[in-house]
Image (cartoon, helix red, strand yellow):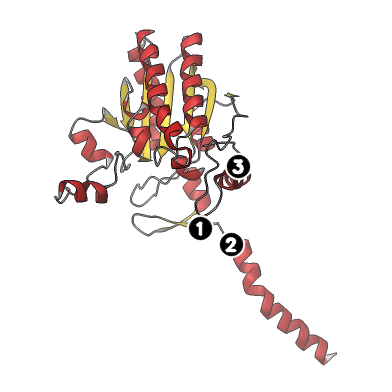
């Protein structure tokens, strides 16, 4: 009996720390800016904005749509997925990267196209998913953005793009670069139709996405502190052989130098976009 009690105690001692870790894992998050440890539920209620320093955490595409749209929406082209045209392999096959991301995130590629209402106004929104291979733009992302623009044009609705991307998807080579021209051409037709396009740039928005639709809005707005640019700071410094200014490529720097129209805190985004659409459609 004494052996049983000692054995039971040793088992409890062995398993208790792991059990505690499982129960508490994911309940707390550390702010990337100020280092504050924040209870995840409190962070969610604050729209993933640090209550101490106002750092804006990344949000998923699904969370973006929940933030901006009124209740239900209709998703379009959800079944589209890459065919791995180059059969690309680096550290592991591109096809496996796609499958792993799909399994982890529950989406087929790095963007969701949705049709719904924003403060009662019908809109079409494309929201990018950074967790899916860095939110990179391949053939599927380019095609879904183009189709979203065409849907908005056919139905005479405003178009909104929420960018969060590392740029073009290198695993698809030239095919990914072709998306820059295709999306830009679609936006040119959208502009001719005299419909408003609002581009929301979040952290990060870089590479080919910045070089195409992200900076082509009738109104280009960004969240505070967002990294926005084409090439990375290190590449630019090596190219021009000069030290870059403090805060270079952050949204505040871009606003000061005329590359953005406004910086809008996350809590104010929905009302700001709604008010902007009222002005653009009058």
Q: Which residue is pictured at 49% across the width and 51% down the height?
A: 90
Residue identifier under label 2:
24
Please tell me whether residue 77 is drawn above or below residue 128 in the rendered image: above
Q: Nearer the viewer, residue 1 or 208?
A: 208
Where residue 27 appears, x then y in whole percent? 55, 57
Residue identifier under label 3:
102
Secondary element type, mark 3 = helix
Where residue 185 appears, x then y in whole percent? 38, 18
Question: Label 3, label 1: how many angstroms apart (C-alpha)?
Answer: 25 Å
Residue projecting furthest to the left: 242
Q: Which residue is pictured at 58% across the width and 44% down the height?
A: 95
Where's the C terminus, which quadrant? top left
Contact? badges 1 and 2 (CB < 8 Å): yes
Q: Which mark is residue 177?
A: none
Q: Nearer the viewer, residue 219 or 150?
A: 150
Q: Is residue 47 visible?
A: no
Residue projecting furthest to the right: 1
């Amino acid at each position: 009996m004494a052996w049983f009690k000692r054995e039971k105690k040793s088992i409890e001692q062995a398993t208790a720390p792991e059990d505690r870790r499982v129960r508490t894992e994911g309940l707390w998050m550390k702010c990337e800016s100020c280092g504050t440890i924040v209870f995840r539920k409190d962070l969610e209620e604050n729209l993933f904005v640090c209550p101490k320093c106002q750092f804006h955490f990344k949000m998923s595409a699904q969370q973006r749509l929940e933030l901006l749209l009124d209740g239900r929406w209709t998703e379009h082209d959800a079944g589209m997925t890459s065919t791995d045209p180059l059969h690309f392999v680096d550290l592991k096959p591109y096809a496996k990267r796609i499958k792993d991301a799909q399994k982890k995130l529950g989406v087929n590629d790095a963007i969701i196209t949705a049709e719904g209402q924003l403060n009662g106004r019908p809109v079409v929104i494309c929201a990018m998913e950074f967790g899916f291979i860095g939110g990179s733009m391949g053939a599927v992302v380019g095609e879904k953005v183009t189709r979203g623009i065409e849907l908005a044009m056919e139905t005479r609705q405003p178009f909104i793009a929420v960018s969060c991307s590392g740029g073009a998807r290198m695993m698809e080579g030239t095919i990914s670069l072709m998306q820059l021209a295709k999306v830009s051409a679609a936006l040119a037709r959208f502009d001719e139709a005299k419909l408003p396009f609002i581009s929301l740039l979040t952290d990060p928005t870089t590479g080919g996405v910045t070089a195409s639709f992200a900076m082509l809005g009738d109104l280009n707005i960004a969240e505070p502190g967002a990294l926005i640019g084409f090439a990375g700071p290190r590449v630019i410094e090596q190219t021009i052989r000069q030290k870059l200014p403090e805060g270079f490529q952050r949204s505040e720097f871009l606003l000061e130098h005329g590359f953005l129209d406004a910086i809008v805190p996350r809590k104010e985004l929905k009302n700001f976009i709604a008010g902007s659409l009222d002005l653009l459609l009058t």
